[in-house]
Image (cartoon, rainbow, N blue to C red):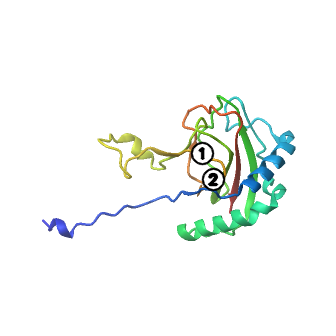
Amino acid sequence: MGDLLDNMDYPIFPILITEIHNFITDDELKKIKKVINENVSLLKKHETFGKNAKSSHEDNSRFIDLIPFIKPKISKAVEEYTNKCGFKTDHELVNSWFNIQKKDSVLAKHTHPGAIISGALFIKADSKSSKLFFHNPNPMIYFTSARARTMYNFEWVYFNPKPKTLILFPAWLQHGSNGTCNKTIDRTVVSFNYI
């Protein structure tokens, strides 16, 4: 039997989620809110949300084109993220949209097929807003019992949404509100996909 000092631990298959606080300025936040208010006619019901929520999501929606001052910042953040992950991308924006969730709405667990990197830029959120949960992609984790939660056995992690915060993640990673209801009036997010 080998000496315990010769043993090594290998944390394998990590998943990078990047959270950038104060990604936009207060002035940029005001401009985005103004453009959203001018485009509420784009909102419609979407299968990803339960009641009391609407989205401007379409496969070819390009909401970021209406707020061009933010596009270079997002592109740079996505490029830095892909460099850390080692993902090969074309750094091309596929689509972008905005969501507005009313009180008691739920964001169903979902992924963003056809993309490599996804992002969520929080425009309006507070302590009553539903959290953004990311689910462990290992389907076998649910078959194990945990004595204590560690980085090796968690079923999900969550982020508290805050205005002006950008979250970047792999598009294949399941995310949603984990069945919890939003309690904020008009929880607002700009989302996007890159390939």
Q: Amino acid at mark 2?
A: Thr
The x, y position of residue 95, in whole percent, is: 75, 55
In front of the other: 94 or 39: 39
Q: Using residue 121 as the reference point, say whether residue 11 is left or right of it.
A: left
User: Contact, CB < 8 Å: mark 2 with mark 1?
Assistant: yes
Per the rendering, the mark at residue 114 is none
Whether 30 is drawn above or below 90: the answer is: above
Question: Residue at image x 34%, y 42%?
Answer: 144
Number of numbered discs visible in the structure rendering: 2
In front of the other: 15 or 185: 185
Question: Residue at image x 64%, y 28%?
Answer: 104
Residue holding disc 2: 165
Judged from the image, the secondary structure of the residue bearing numbered disc 1 is: loop
Looking at this rendering, what residue extends furthest in the front direction? Answer: 26
Residue neighbourhood size for the residue with mark 1, other residues' Cα within 10 Å, grouped as few (<14), some (14–19), many (≥20): many
Question: Residue at image x 40%, y 45%?
Answer: 141
Judged from the image, the secondary structure of the residue bearing numbered disc 2 is: loop
**Quarter residue 148 falls in:** top left
Q: Using residue 41 as the reference point, say whether residue 90 is left or right of it.
A: left
Distance of mark 2 from mark 1, alpha carbons?
7 Å
Q: Amino acid at mark 1?
A: Pro
Residue neighbourhood size for the residue with mark 2, other residues' Cα within 10 Å, grouped as few (<14), some (14–19), many (≥20): many
Per the rendering, the mark at residue 161 is 1
Question: Residue at image x 54%, y 57%?
Answer: 17
The x, y position of residue 19, in whole percent, is: 57, 56
Q: Taking the image as drawn, is residue 183 in sight?
A: yes
**Quarter residue 169 falls in:** bottom right
The x, y position of residue 186, in whole percent, is: 72, 36
Q: Could you tell me which quadrant the N terminus lies in?
A: bottom left
In front of the other: 189 or 107: 189
The x, y position of residue 125, in whole percent, is: 65, 42
